[in-house]
Image (spheres, grey):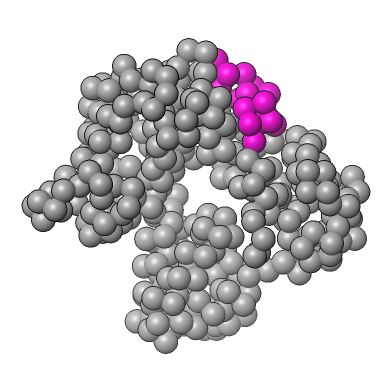
Amino acid sequence: MDDPLWIETHAPSLDDIPQEDVRERLQDAVDEPVNLVLHGPVGVGKTAAVRALAAAAHESENDLFELNVKDFFGMTKKEIANDPRFEHFITPKRKRESSKADLINYVLKESASYPPVSGDYTTVLLDNAESIREDFQQALRRVMEQHHEATQFVIATRQPTKLIPPIRSRCFPVSVRAPTADETVGVLRDIVEAEEVAYEDDGLEYVAGYAAGNLRKAVTAAQATYEAEGEVTMDAAYETLQDVGLDDEISGMLDDAEAGDFTDARSTLDDLLVDEGLDGTEVLDEILRVGRSRYAGDDLAELHELAGDVDVMLAEGNSDRVQLGRMLAELGR
């Protein structure tokens, strides 16, 4: 999609969050700031809800600091040191003399110590927090204790049980369930009307059913339908979403991996995870789907063996990008 993504341009305000129970709990957190753990499945709106919370709580967008833990902990020491979000407070000496672990701990502390631009506190979002190793969670616990007066910590995760008890005990849990079909249709209707897109209710209902509770997938599918057919009707959605597939991207990524062009394969993987908004499990499923028509015999068995190892690592909360990248590297060998 070359046009701006609807999932970004139509990010919800606090009042627009479709799950009523989540709206109410987050409104309470605006009135009385507390640390939170938002937990729920992929694509249900956890990150968008935290951004809506911060927009309602702070006059300046600079009072929200976001850290995608999954990507952050998968970065090399050099990538952390040179990241534009951090390099203004990571001195050359610290870059040279610190280990990766030290840099990670330092970034956590610095991020939590930012003085608020407006109001009395800042909000720090730690997204995909199931990827935090236990030793770093202990460091985070100490940071939370040290900066609790001026920093609100919001942790978003698919697996709250991955968090150590001292962190869970310092946070109020907010369960973010998948939106119902009717709630998803309501979100889609608001977006297509704002975009002045021709639509029919049964088209929105088809898209909602296709997404099966994944709000991000629903909005992306509605936009794909509009860009392909110029409207969001039942026929348009059926034609578009039946044809929506990632065969070319997946096949190209596997071609590059097998040829040893790991940089190109990794670039396609990043596009799938970031631009397409897929999570690691979804990409893995697509690789297996394409692989079944691409490989046979021992090659197919090896692909399934690699996929099984990656699936276990993803279930344990490891980085999607790192684990799938490792799989591509193994295919190259």
Q: Nearer the viewer, residue 63 or 147?
A: 63
Examine the structure image and report whether residue 107 is included in the region drawn in magenta. no
Task: Tell me which secondary structure the magenta stretch mostly adopts.
Answer: helix
Tell me the quarter of the image containing the N terminus: bottom right
The x, y position of residue 262, in whole percent, is 38, 77
Bounds of the magenta segment: 12-28
Q: Is residue 301 visible?
A: no
The x, y position of residue 9, in whole percent, is 64, 47
Q: Number of numbered discs present?
A: 0
* Placement of 290 over or under 151, stated as above or below: below
The reply, left or right, for residue 271 in relation to residue 325 is: right
Examine the structure image and report whether residue 24 is included in the region drawn in magenta. yes
Quarter where residue 232 is shown: bottom right
The x, y position of residue 220, in whole percent, is 68, 54
In the image, what residue occupies the spot 74% across and 39% down? 187
Q: Is residue 149 visible?
A: yes
Q: Nearer the viewer, residue 78 or 134?
A: 78
The reply, left or right, for residue 26 in relation to residue 190 is: left
The x, y position of residue 16, in whole percent, is 69, 30
In the image, what residue occupies the spot 24% across and 34% down? 109
The reply, left or right, for residue 177 in relation to residue 132 is: right
Quarter where residue 226 is shown: bottom right
In the image, what residue occupies the spot 83% across and 59% down? 237
Q: Nearer the viewer, residue 222 or 31?
A: 31
